[in-house]
Each structure stands twice: as structure tokens, then as C-alpha cells.
Image: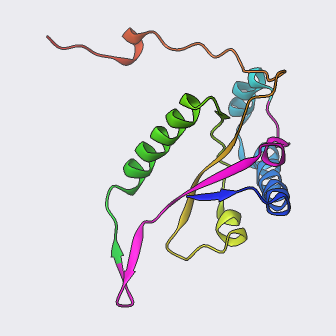
Amino acid sequence: FCLISDPILKTKIRKSAEEEERKSYEERMSDQWLKDLEPLGTDHNKPFLEEAPYLIVVFKKPYEIVDGKQVPNYYVNESVGIAAGILIAALQNAGLATLTHTPSPMNFLKELLNRPDNERAYLLLPVGYPKKNAKVPCIKRKRKEEVITEYF
């Protein structure tokens, strides 16, 4: 994890993330994807990356370097996903707000944060107390019957 509060670095991250997001919205996303995003009101502008007091960048390490050789790490995505979920739950339990932000590609984070070659950005979390006028999209949860198959 990288914890970032430096305003200059947060501005650099925002500018780089918005450039990748602009490319995604204009070139990479399908018409259906864009239509599906409409109710959320999102676009390439990401002011929260500067407004949040902290940014947490979660990195994964697909391999280690041991004696100059690459040694694979196993179940990296699963392990990092579980750790990120626990972190998000802990932040919410502490009364903090966050959202999962995954501009794609995220190579700029490795470069801006001067991370080693064996690290890949996995998730970007802006963290802070929620604004009084914060808008949360009305996303309905699926009924348990839609996601659970029971066998007795």
C-alpha cells in the first residue's frame, strides 16, 4: 500500500488518471458500457482525487526478486482483493468514506510513485470523511436468490 497526502502528488495522480479516463470514455468503452454508466453520472473528471485528504494505492506483486531471479507469487489477485476488501470494511467501520477507483491502465501510478518493476497498481482508494452534500448513487442490491444457489 502507498498512503498519499501530498497535494502536489495528488494533483499529478489526478491529471494522469483523468487522461486515462478520458481515453477510456472516448475510445475504449463500448456504447453499452457508456450507457450503463449514465445513471451513475460519471465521466473522466475525478476531482475527488485531489479533494480527499488521503489516497491509498494498493499494489500487487506478481513476483519477487530473489538472488536476481524472478520467483512467482501465487494467488496474488485473490490475496490482494481480500486484503483490499478488509481495508475498505475497516475504513467504513471507522466512519470514513471511500470508493474503488480503477483507471485503466494504471501504469502511471507505478511511475509517479517510483515503485519497483515487480509491483502493479491494483486499486486506488480516495479516503476521507464524507462531504455533507455527498451524493451516493441508488444502486439496488441483487436479491440473494440471484447470487446464491442453495444445495440441501
Q: Position of residue 115 (x, y in %)?
A: 60, 73
Q: Position of residue 3 (x, y in %)?
A: 64, 57
The colour scheme applied to this rendered structure is: rainbow
Q: Which residue corresponds to the image point at 33% horizontal and 17% vertical from the top-left?
A: 148
Left or right: 18 as drawn, with respect to 148: right
Q: Which residues are magenta?
A: 42-70
**Residue positioned most to the bottom:** 68
Reply above or below: 137 against 99.
above
User: Quadrant where the C terminus lies?
Assistant: top left
User: Quadrant where the N terminus lies?
Assistant: bottom right
Which quadrant would residue 8 be assigned to in this image? Answer: bottom right
Q: For this rendering, which residue is in front, 80 or 43?
A: 80
Reply above or below: 15 against 47.
below
Q: For this rendering, which residue is in front, 116 or 31?
A: 116
Q: Position of residue 58 (x, y in %)?
A: 56, 54
Left or right: 40 as drawn, with respect to 89: right
Say how many tags the image has.
0
Q: Which residue corresponds to the image point at 41% horizontal and 43% vertical from the top-left?
A: 82
Q: Which residue corresponds to the image point at 54% horizontal and 29% vertical from the top-left?
A: 93
Q: Which residue corresponds to the image point at 51% horizontal and 36% vertical from the top-left?
A: 90
Reply above or below: 110 against 47.
below
Left or right: 74 as drawn, with respect to 88: left
> Is residue 67 a member of the stretch shown in magenta?
yes
> Is residue 56 a member of the stretch shown in magenta?
yes
Q: Position of residue 52 (x, y in %)?
A: 77, 43
Left or right: 60 as drawn, with respect to 98: left
**Residue positioned most to the left:** 152
